[in-house]
């Protein structure tokens, strides 16, 4: 597992979202290693967000953004400006509730994954030379997000990884 953790946190890794089978164990191991590396970690773990507004509230409460308009553009901008108010060598976000979003707000989950996987990852990797990674629990049903090509311009394996 140590090699998996190092790969997840590596600055040279292109993948920015990892769906992991053993979520609790990965959260613990990644958190410990991230702390040693000077990374900030955040966990959105309420488990009850089932729509965009609840998701935005979770992000606002978790990150305590200086200003947050609670929409997709504001989330993108706020996540891209960490260095202004929370400097660190890297950032790890644990999102522990994709089931509710998958069942009740599928389109919102797609947008969230798009923001976290491509836009934010590319921003941090290319401009700031800093790692931003998101880790979510894995379930076979999430593969439909990719099988149906719901997430445009995104190949499973390019920005998104699965750790079984």
Image (cartoon, helix red, strand yellow):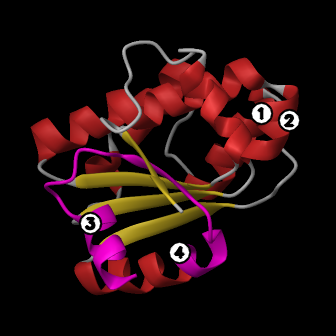
Residue 7 is labelled as 3
Element on which disc 2 rests:
loop
Alpha carbon of mark 4 to alpha carbon of mark 2: how far?
Answer: 24 Å
Quarter of the figure with residue 69: top right
Question: Which circle's residue, 3 or 1, is located before the other in the chain?
Answer: 3
Q: Mark 1 = which residue?
A: 102
Q: Which residues are magenta?
A: 1-27
Residue drawn 21% across the image and 66% down it? 89
Element on which disc 3 rests:
helix
Alpha carbon of mark 3 to alpha carbon of mark 1: how far?
Answer: 27 Å
Whether residue 72 is situated above or below residue 36 in the rendered picture = above
Whether residue 78 is situated above or below residue 65 in the rendered picture = above
Q: Nearer the viewer, residue 141 or 89?
A: 141
Q: Position of residue 127 (x, y in %)?
A: 12, 37
Element on which disc 1 rests:
helix
The quadrant of the image that shows the N terminus is: bottom left
For this view, does 134 lie left or right of residue 59? left
Residue 26 is labelled as 4
Q: Pointer 2: residues within 10 angstroms few (<14), some, or many (20+)?
A: many
């Amino acid at each position: 597992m140590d090699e998996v953790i190092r790969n997840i946190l590596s600055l040279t890794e292109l993948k920015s979202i990892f769906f992991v089978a053993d979520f609790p164990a990965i959260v613990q191991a990644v958190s410990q290693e991230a702390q040693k590396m000077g990374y900030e970690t955040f966990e959105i773990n309420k488990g009850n967000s089932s729509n965009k507004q609840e998701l935005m509230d979770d992000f606002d409460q978790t990150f305590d953004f200086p200003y947050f308009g609670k929409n997709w553009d504001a989330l993108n901008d706020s996540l891209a400006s960490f260095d202004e108010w929370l400097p660190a060598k890297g950032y790890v976000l644990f999102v522990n509730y994709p089931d509710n979003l998958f069942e009740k707000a599928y389109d919102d989950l797609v947008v969230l994954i798009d923001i976290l996987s491509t836009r934010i990852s590319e921003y941090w990797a290319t401009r700031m030379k800093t790692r931003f990674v998101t880790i979510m629990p894995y379930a076979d049903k999430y593969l439909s997000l990719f099988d149906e090509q719901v997430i445009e311009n995104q190949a499973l394996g390019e920005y998104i990884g699965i750790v079984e």
